[in-house]
Amino acid sequence: MEKKKVLFATSEAAPFVTSGGLGQVAGALAATLRENFEDLDVRIVLPLYAPVRRRYFTDMKLVAETKTKLSWRDNYCGIYETQYDGIIYYFVDNLQYFGRDRAYGYYDDGERFAWFCKAVFSVIEETGFVPDVIHAHDWQTALVPIYLKTRFNNLYPDMRSVFTIHNIEYQGQFARETLYDVFDLKEYERGLVDYHHCVNLMKGAIVTCDRLTTVSPTYARDITEYGGHWLEQIIRENKYKLTGIINGIDTTLYDPAKDTSIFANFSSDSALDMLAGKAENKRRLQALFGLPADSGKLLLCVVSRLVSHKGMDLLTVVADDIVALGAQLLVLGTGDHNYELYFSELALRHPKSVAVNIAYNPELAAKIYAGSDATLMPSKAEPCGLAQMVAARYGTVPIVRATGGLKDTIKDCRAGSGNGFSFVHYNAGELLYTIRKAHDLYMYHPDDWTALMKEAMETDFSWDASAGEYANLYRQLTIDDN
C-alpha cells in the first residue's frame, strides 16, 4: 500500500519547541496520526532555533546545504533531520534568522518566517519527500499555501494544502510596502494578501489553501459570525472549505497515574485512590504556596496568561467574593502588568486565602492541576483551550465560559450530566454565581463532587477521534483530485 505523504510546516512542535497550544497540538497530532493510520507518512519541518540546537543538535544529521531565495536575498539554508517518537523531523538552519533564544518577538519576524516558508520548499526539493498534502499552521506558515499557488504550482501541481487557524487574533499583518521586499510577492498578487490597508498573511492563506481548519467546531462558527477579528467576511466567502476539528491532548504525557512531576500519583480506577491522591496533592500544594492545609476549603486555580480576553477582567471583579466564600485561590501565569500587580496585591491582602506566582512554569502547573479542586477559565474567547482538558484529566473540575472549544469540551453538570461547570454570558455576576454553585456542591454534596471528578477524569480528551478527522480530510483531498 502506497502511503499518503503529509508534511507539517509549523513554527513550533513538541517536544523540541513549544510556547503554548500550537506546539503541543502539532507534536501530539502528528504522533497520533503515525500510531493510528498506517496509510499516512507524516513528517514535520520547523526552524532550528538556538535552544533546539543546543539541546538536540548531536542527534541530528545533515541532509543538505543549499540556498533559499526570498526576494533579493539568497541565504544559506541548512537542512537537518532527526527522529522522535517514530516521526521524521526536518530542521531548517539559518543563524541570521533563527540563532536566537526565542521563537518570536523580533522586529523582523515577518521576514524570518517568510524565508522559512520558502525554505520549506527547499526541504521538499533536497530530501525528495514530496508530500501529497502540506499542512501549515497559523500565520507564521501562512505563506506556504500562498507560495504553493503562486511560485511552486507548476513544480508540484498535485500537492494540496491545509491551513489551520489556531488563534485568529494573530494574523501576520504588515505594512503594504512589504509586499515584494519582505514577502517576495508581485504587485499583481497583492489582492491575495491585501486587506484593510495592510498585508495580511492569514487572509492570503485562507484564500489560497485547499482546505481550511480551525481548532474546534464552535470556534469555526464564531470566527465566521462575529469572532473573526475583521476576517469574518473572508472566512464566510471560503466557508465551503472550513472545518472545525477539536484539539486533543497527549493523554500519555498528562497522566496523573504516571506523571513524575506531581506529588502523588492517582487514577480514577478506584474512588478511594482518586480521593486519597487528590487529598495528598492538595495538602502538599497548599504547603508549597504557604496556604493553610485545609481539606475543607475549595481550592480554585487559575493557570493562564493574565490578559483580558482570558477573562481576567471578570476575575478581578469577583476575587474578593471568592475569598469571602471561604475558598482559596492559586494563580500561575504572566501577562499584562496591571493584572500581575492586581493578583500580587490580592495575595498580600489575603495571605491565607490567595497565593500567586507570576511565571510560566509547566512543571508547577502540573502540581497545581493535580492538587486543586477546580480551575477557572472565564474566557472572552477561546479557540480550543487545552488547560480545561488537562485539569479535568487530573480531577480538577473546570469552571468555564461556554465559548469556542470550552463549549465543545466542557458540559455543565447542572444539566443532568456533565464534566464541569459552564456559564454563557460574559459578565462577572454569572461567573460568581457559577463559582458559588461549584462551592456548594463541593461543601455540601461530597458524593456528587466525587462523581463529577470521576466524570471529568474519564472524559476522552485524546487525539484519536480528531486525528481521524484529519486523516479523512487528507484522504479526501487526494481522492478529489483523482
Image (tube, rainbow, N blue to C red):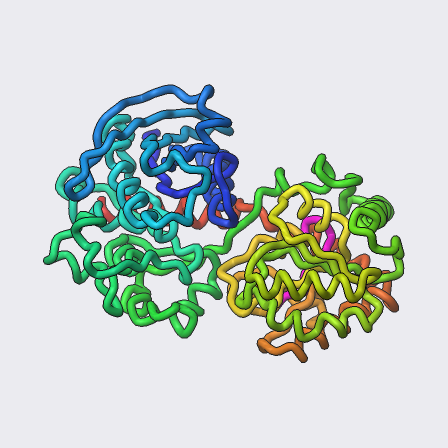
- Residue 244 in the image: above or below residue 92: below
Q: In the picture provided, is 247 more to the left or to the right than 429? A: left
On the image, the x and y values in percent for residue 305 come to: 57, 57
Location of the N terminus by quadrant is top left
On the image, the x and y values in percent for residue 156 come to: 19, 39
Asked whether residue 419 appears in the rendered view, the answer is no
Splitting the image into 4 quarters, where does residue 38 fall?
top left
- Residue 75 in the image: above or below residue 238: above
Q: Residue at x 89, y 56 (%)?
A: 294
Question: Among all residues in the image, which is located at the extreme left?
Answer: 188
Q: Residue at x 26, y 23 (%)?
A: 65
In magenta, the rendered stretch is: 392-400
Q: Is residue 174 magenta?
A: no
Location of the C terminus by quadrant is top left
Q: Residue at x 81, y 60 (%)?
A: 351
Q: Nearer the viewer, residue 296 or 19?
A: 19
Q: Is residue 397 magenta?
A: yes
Q: Nearer the viewer, residue 104 or 263?
A: 104
Asked whether residue 155 appears in the rendered view, the answer is yes
On the image, the x and y values in percent for residue 313 come to: 60, 71
Q: Residue at x 42, y 22 (%)?
A: 60
Q: In the picture provided, is 101 more to the left or to the right than 403? A: left
How many marks can you see?
0
